[in-house]
Amino acid sequence: MTDTTTPRGFSDVFDTEVVGRWSAPGRVNLIGEHTDYNDGFVLPFAIDRRTTVTVGVRTDRLLRVSSSFEAGVHEISLDALDPASMSGWSSYVFGIAWALHVAPTRAESPAFSAAGGDLSGVDLSTATGLDLFVESDVPVGAGLSSSAALECSVALAFAELWSIDVNRSTLAAVGQLAENEAVGAPTGIMDQSASLLGRADSGVFLDCRSLDADVVELGFAAAGLEVLVVDTKVEHAHATGGYVDRRASCERGAAALGVSSLRDLDADDLARAEQMLDDETFRRVRHVVTENQRVLDTVRTLRTDGARAIGHLLDASHVSMRDDFEISVPELDLAVATAQASGALGARMTGGGFGGSAIALVPTEARAAVEQAVVAAFAEAGFAAPTVFTVNADEGARRDA
Ligand code: GLA
């Protein structure tokens, strides 16, 4: 049934004239999970699913936002940007304005100093209000960073329309600040970095401490491979529960071992860690330490031996998340095991865990068989039907019109 109350486009909601359209992609993390907030390494890529924001300039100081997926308009004044008054999906939009507003006062924070952008000229005191209309084909709650896609499309539009001249790493730090303090999810900087820095057919190899980002060619299509996403439909949230606990365990482990972050440990430190930590904290630490190494190994393998050689690293990453970090769920384990058994070269859950999606690296000729096997295995297990689709590595955030 068609919902006639749902707005369909910018001009159904707003009277202002459209001045431009910006978009930003969701992401798949190829490897490097729960390493970003430990100052470690990640290798995500931007996907060919995007969030688009169409913008009109107002004459007052209001930000008004509406979308194709929900009737109604949310608004806030640029003179009253306060996370306490933000809620629901519009907090991702208003949170970006708030984060830009406070960014100059946070210039010394690790993320902003590593990003190296000059924030001294950022000043929203004379910025004009805007009307924003959001559309998206990034699935929500699937672990593909629909929130970063929204944050980054909006951040790019704000930066351009308010003449804020900062680099993309700084905009990623703005997105992270919004998510941490306006939305309340203590996430790292990976998702926003992937959404802003992504390139077609490439991964973003990011050092989350220095924020140095290298583009790594993936070459999946040339190698006859596809990345299949299995959205398990199991919903997760990072503002509560497991994500917060895992982050706290990592901080406890680092403190007990006398390092500022788990990035400062490598495999040689694990014997000492095992002696000093309780079993659970040790396994959390071991996941992060070994996962950092797997990211480095994946980048090296892609460069030397090509995409067909990385499957075992994806498999090992999943085992580590399932057994050591304990962030998988039965649906993700089944998706991974079934994909591996029916022709995938490697598979793992992707994103924060506790639900969301798994990815499988699949030779094109095995794609249909893997998809059918996963769908059948879910039905057999009595799980809700998953959505299975292919993603390609695509360009990061951009102005489209
Ligand atoms: C979520 C967070 C990221 C990262 C991943 C886990 O996607 O937003 O910052 O921590 O989980 O790798």
Image: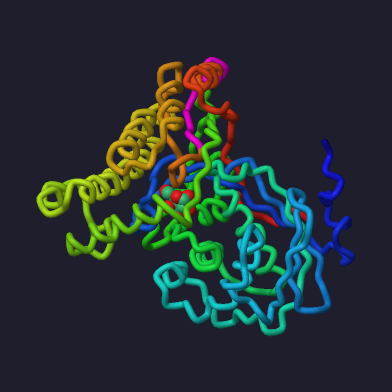
The front one of 320 and 23 is 320
Splitting the image into 4 quarters, where does residue 49 fall?
top right
Splitting the image into 4 quarters, where does residue 152 fall?
bottom right
- In the rendered image, the quadrant that contains the N terminus is top right
Q: Residue at x 59, y 42 (%)?
A: 47
The front one of 199 and 322 is 322
Query: For the magenta stretch, what is the residue range?
Result: 357-371
- Relative to residue 208, is residue 192 drawn left or right? right
Asked whether 318 falls inside the magenta stretch, the response is no
Residue 51: x percent and y percent?
67, 50
| Residue extending farthest front | 382
Q: Does any portion of residue 342 appear in the rendered image?
A: yes
Residue 244: x percent and y percent?
39, 56
Residue 185: x percent and y percent?
48, 59
Q: Residue at x 73, y 69 (%)?
A: 75
Q: Is residue 66 above or below residue 301?
A: below
The front one of 71 and 399 is 71
Splitting the image into 4 quarters, where does residue 341 fall?
top left
Q: Residue at x 83, y 77 (%)?
A: 59
Residue 338: x percent and y percent?
44, 21
Colour scheme of this structure image? rainbow
- In the rendered image, the quadrant that contains the C terminus is bottom right
| Residue extending farthest bottom | 125
Q: Does any portion of residue 363 appear in the rendered image?
A: no
- Relative to residue 259, is residue 192 drawn left or right? right
Q: Residue at x 23, y 45 (%)?
A: 283
